[in-house]
């Protein structure tokens, strides 16, 4: 009897913690997320200010204290997130789980690798939670459609990128033979770099062909570049037109912490756990 009561109390404590940390439908959960987003913003601003030499010289100690304060708070939050979900490893491998971990690692790494703490700007990715905090569910739905279209397009995009890479190798090798080291094409890899810059229509101008044949090939690559840029856009657009979505909710699964469930869902679509 007592053991059953203890288990029930323990479960209710985890449910309450999950509701505060992961959910945005309750007042406590919304307040927690708003405070979290403000903290993320302050910590990112502190890191950026610390990179300014004049500010670091005068306020370096304060900024260092702020960095460690938020790192310890985010570390505690990360641990609590692992505790209150039924499948902590699944959450740790999720997108937000990885982002939450990367948001605290640079500060600890800076003890061994000076300067690595500036990687803390990755914390800004955590602000993506703002979409569910302010109930912007339609944005979550659009994001899900876009991800679905990208997944459906991945094989075509891989084939397209392999084709582009093949063209870059061919054109780079040709330009190396035609122009040579005297005109800046000192090696095939450097010529490939020129081919990529030209094919993508970026055109830095640090290397340019000087011979008539080389300029003719460069013109052809530039024209091809406009067509090549449109290919991946067209691939994703087709998949976007095929994708559809239902109304979704901001509710997070208590087991795997996954979001993006349909409004009338009773069970999680990813781990089949019952939703609260």
Image: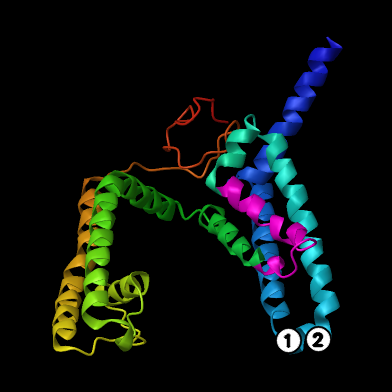
Q: Is residue 262 above or below residue 154?
A: above
Task: Give the left or right position of residue 6, taking residue 144 as reference.
Answer: right
Q: Give the labeled residue for mark 1.
A: 53
Residue 113: percent from left, percent from top: 74, 64
* The one of 56 and 201 positioned closer to us in this rendering: 201
Residue 57: percent from left, percent from top: 81, 86
Indicate yes or no whether the magenta region holds residue 67.
no
Is most of the magenta stretch helix, strand or loop? helix
| Residue lying furthest top | 1
Q: Give the labeled residue for mark 2.
A: 57
Q: Can see residue 133?
A: yes
Disc tally is 2
Residue 156: percent from left, percent from top: 24, 49
Task: Give the left or right position of residue 173, taking residue 41 as reference.
Answer: left
* The one of 188 and 156 positioned closer to us in this rendering: 188
Quadrant position of the C terminus in the picture: top right
Segment colored magenta:
96-118
Q: Secondary structure at mark 1?
A: helix
Indicate yes or no whether the magenta region holds residue 98.
yes
Q: Secondary structure at mark 2?
A: helix
Q: Can see residue 104?
A: no
Crowding at label 2, few (<14), some or many (≥20) Cα neighbours within 10 Å?
few
Q: CA distance from mark 1 to mark 2?
A: 6 Å
Residue at 32 percent across and 43 percent down: it is 245
* The one of 92 and 200 positioned closer to us in this rendering: 200
Residue at 82 percent across and 82 percent down: it is 59
Discs 1, 2 touching: Cβ within 8 Å = yes
The disc placed on residue 44 is: none
Q: Is residue 187 above or below residue 22?
A: below
């Amino acid at each position: 009897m007592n053991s059953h009561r203890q288990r029930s109390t323990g479960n209710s404590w985890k449910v309450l913690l999950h509701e505060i940390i992961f959910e945005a439908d309750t007042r406590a959960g919304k307040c927690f997320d708003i405070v979290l987003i403000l903290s993320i913003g302050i910590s990112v601003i502190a890191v950026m200010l610390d990179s300014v030499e004049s500010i670091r010289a005068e306020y370096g100690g304060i900024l260092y204290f702020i960095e460690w304060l938020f790192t310890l708070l985010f570390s505690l939050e990360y641990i609590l997130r692992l505790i209150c979900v039924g499948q902590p490893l699944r959450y740790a491998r999720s997108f937000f789980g990885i982002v939450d971990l990367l948001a605290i690692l640079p500060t600890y790494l800076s003890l061994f690798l000076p300067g690595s703490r500036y990687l803390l700007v990755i914390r800004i990715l955590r602000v993506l939670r703002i979409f569910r905090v302010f109930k912007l569910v339609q944005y979550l739905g659009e994001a899900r459609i876009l991800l679905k279209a990208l997944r459906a397009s991945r094989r075509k995009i891989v084939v397209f990128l392999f084709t582009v890479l093949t063209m870059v190798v061919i054109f780079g090798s040709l330009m190396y033979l035609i122009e040579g080291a005297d005109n800046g094409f000192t090696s095939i890899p450097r010529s490939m770099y020129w081919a990529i810059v030209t094919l993508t229509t970026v055109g830095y101008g640090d290397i340019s062909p000087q011979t008539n044949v080389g300029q003719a090939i460069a013109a052809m690559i530039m024209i091809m570049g406009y067509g090549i840029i449109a290919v991946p856009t067209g691939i994703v657009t087709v998949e976007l037109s095929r994708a559809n979505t239902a109304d979704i909710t901001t509710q997070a699964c208590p087991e795997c912490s996954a979001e993006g469930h349909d409004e009338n869902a009773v069970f999680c679509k990813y781990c089949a756990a019952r939703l609260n």
